[in-house]
Image (cartoon, rainbow, N blue to C red):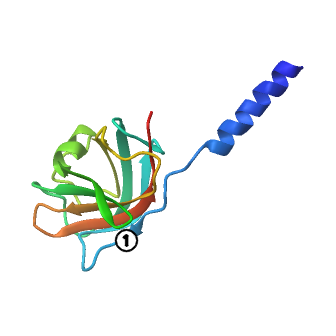
Amino acid sequence: MKFFTAIAALVAVAVANAQTSPTFTDCSTGSTDMTVTGLTLTPYPLCAGGQVCAIVTGTLTSSVTSPAGLSITGKYLGRVVYTDAVDLCTVLGESGYPCPIDTTVTSVEACVDIKPTAPVGIPVSLTLLATNGNGNVLFCQVATVTAAAC
């Protein structure tokens, strides 16, 4: 009986410690080629040196074309503590969404590597700025995230 009580306690702790993806908000300062209605990170918390996938849902007003880019910036106490930039069409293509992406597509997934130097255990303001191949901003989203040493 003690064994089952111990297992139940471990499951309860695991559920209590499970974290969900943070809530992202729009940080764009002008018009964009995509209205984001949802952005989810998995796994969460992020693992420094691991990989994270973002599922983005929304409405495109222009097709996503090459050379689209994604700029990733993390700030802690107003100081930049993390930066990265990736070719958005490359990471989208690796997830089965090759550019050009038509305006009828409403959800995509892209995975990127997290640098092993990512700060762990601190709340970082993470900004994701996606630019389209036509030079327009696709979207800008920001959330407070925490990375772990996994």
Q: Nearer the viewer, residue 76 or 3?
A: 76
Q: Residues within 10 Å of mark 1 (few under 14, many from 20)?
A: some
**x and y percentages locating residue 130 in the rendered image:** 23, 61
Would you say residue 103 is visible in this rendering? no
Q: Nearer the viewer, residue 108 or 73?
A: 73
Quadrant of the snapshot with the N terminus: top right
Q: Is residue 134 above or below residue 13?
A: below
Q: Is residue 132 above or below residue 114?
A: below
- Asked which quadrant contains residue 2, the reply is top right
Circle 1: element type: strand
Quadrant of the snapshot with the C terminus: top left
Q: Residue most toward the bottom? A: 30
Residue 8 relative to residue 32: left or right: right
- Asked which quadrant contains residue 112, the reply is top left
Would you say residue 95 is visible in this rendering? yes
- Asked which quadrant contains residue 143, the reply is bottom left
Residue under label 1, please give it: 26
Q: Is residue 142 above or below residue 150?
A: below
**x and y percentages locating residue 68 in the rendered image:** 15, 56
Residue 20 relative to residue 125: left or right: right
Which residue shows up at 19% across the image and 51% down it? 85
**x and y percentages locating residue 14 in the rendered image:** 66, 37
Which residue shows up at 79% across the image and 26% down it? 6
Q: Residue most toward the right? A: 1
Which residue shows up at 37% across the image and 42% down it? 52
Q: Nearer the viewer, residue 2 or 149?
A: 149
Residue 150 relative to residue 29: left or right: right
The image shows a total of numbered marks equal to 1
**x and y percentages locating residue 116 in the rendered image:** 31, 37
Give the residue type at disc 1.
Answer: Asp
Residue 93 relative to residue 13: left or right: left
